[in-house]
Image (cartoon, grey):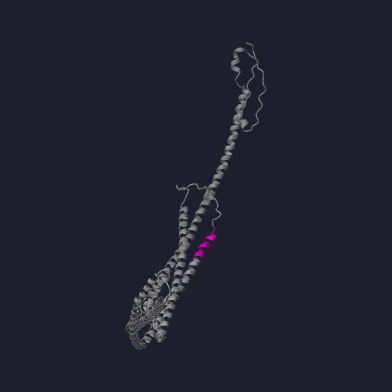
Amino acid sequence: MSSDVLVSRPLYDSRAVAQGVPEKSPPEEVPQLSSGSATAGYRSAKYTPAEWFSNYRTIIQQAGADRREAHSIQRHSKSLYQDAEEVTQKTQAEGTRLLGDRLQDIHCWKSELQRHIEQLLNDTSALLALKTRLEKALDATETPYAITTDNLNCRARRLGPDLVKDSVEEELLKEVDLIRSIQALLKTTIAQVVTQIKLNRDVKQTLEMDWSDKYQAYSFDDHSGRYSNMSPDTLHHPSSATMQDQVCNRTAWIKFTQDNLSRAIQEEQATTSLRALVEQVLLDITEDLRDQCSNVDRAFSRRCEELIEAKTQLEMKHAQILDQIGAQEKNIVALQQAIYNKEAPLRVAQSRLYLRSLRPNMELCRDEPQLSLEGEVQQIDVTLASLHQQLSDARGSLSHLEESRITVEKDMNCKTHSLFIDRDKCMTHRKRYPTIGTLSGY
């Protein structure tokens, strides 16, 4: 085997390359003389002492650099997390304090809302009681209105000169107008009360919604204030820390509640004024109705004698009409008999004309019998037409008499009924006129 000169492998530090440390140039190669083929396998893969020292020194230097860097990072990290911990605790404490202040603000506004809600509830209850009184007072006016209109309707059925606008009718018309105006006033007042109740309820609902929102917000903030670093139920919510554009500020939050409270105060004042107005209305209508009732009662007592005299005259006229109706009915029967008596002659004349119309050829001529028969038929037709016309006139006259009889009987019934109402019914019934308490809605 031939002898070759063996050269050692150069040192390559991969970590130095990765860290950007300039690679040291390999040591100068020193040629070695071969000692023979027997030692060739032992020397070919080994480092030289210089390479060994170089590699050792490189490791020592790298370890020192890593230690110094780690120590610097540790000092910086300790300072950072100590500062961060202090800032975090301070910020958390400030947040907890602000939550406490917020809870106090919410509690104050919530208490104010609760007070006005209760006030609106009391005002609405009072208005509902007044509404019930107004409705009872409105219902109480139906009784005098029914009595008055019934009297007017009965007296309005008088005919001709009997339609006298006497003192009773004038007082009744005044009472009707008074009751109508009172009913219109009560209906208007009821509408105002209903409107105010609706406004109170709307404001109360607004306050309740605001109160409910603050109650929930108070619950959330109270629960949030109880959170600590040791709380087991805290979670990560990254998106919750993002500022929302549509969220209102504190000024808008306070103004919203102040506006609601201002509206509630306005409705409370309106309710107080309306309650005083309703009380005065009920007092006034009660006095007016009782005064007019007394005027009507006095007028009724002066009218009974005139009704008795009018009723007597109608009874006399009714007897005359009945006599005339009987005479006209007899006349109609006579006319019907006369018409019936013309039926046989008419059939005879028409039968003769029919048979003569069957004569053959030149025998069918207008001779004297033919002319006589035609004249006879015409004369009977004219007579029947006159009788039918007279019968129609008689029936029309009878119909007019019947209508007059019915009209007189109705007027007699009206007078009888009016006398009954004026003397026996109205004067007695009007003693049951609603009392002052009933007219006031109690």
Q: Quadrant of the C terminus?
A: bottom left
Is residue 253 rendered magenta in the image? Answer: yes
Q: In screen coordinates, is 139 left or right of 268?
A: left
Q: State how many labels appear.
A: 0
Q: Quadrant of residue 167?
A: bottom left
Of residues 229 and 416, the one nearer the viewer is 416
Of residues 89 and 364, the one nearer the viewer is 364
Residue 35 position, x and y percent, is: 63, 13
Is residue 289 rendered magenta in the image? Answer: no
Name the residue: 57% across, 41% down. 75
Is 222 situated above or below 307?
Answer: above
Q: Quadrant of the N terminus?
A: top right
Of residues 412 and 376, the one nearer the viewer is 376
State the extent of the magenta-drawn residues as a range: 249-260
Q: Quadrant of residue 36?
A: top right
Q: Quadrant of residue 289?
A: bottom left
Looking at this rendering, what residue extends furthest in the top direction?
Answer: 1
Is 302 situated above or below 432?
Answer: below
Q: In screen coordinates, is 71 left or right of 115?
A: right
Residue 129 position, x and y percent, is: 40, 71
| Residue 431 appears in view | no
| Residue 274 appears in view | yes
Looking at this rendering, what residue extends furthest in the front direction?
Answer: 362
Q: Main structural element of the magenta stretch: helix, strand or loop?
A: helix
Residue 186 position, x and y percent, is: 43, 75
Of residues 417 and 176, the one nearer the viewer is 417
Residue 64 position, x and y percent, is: 59, 33
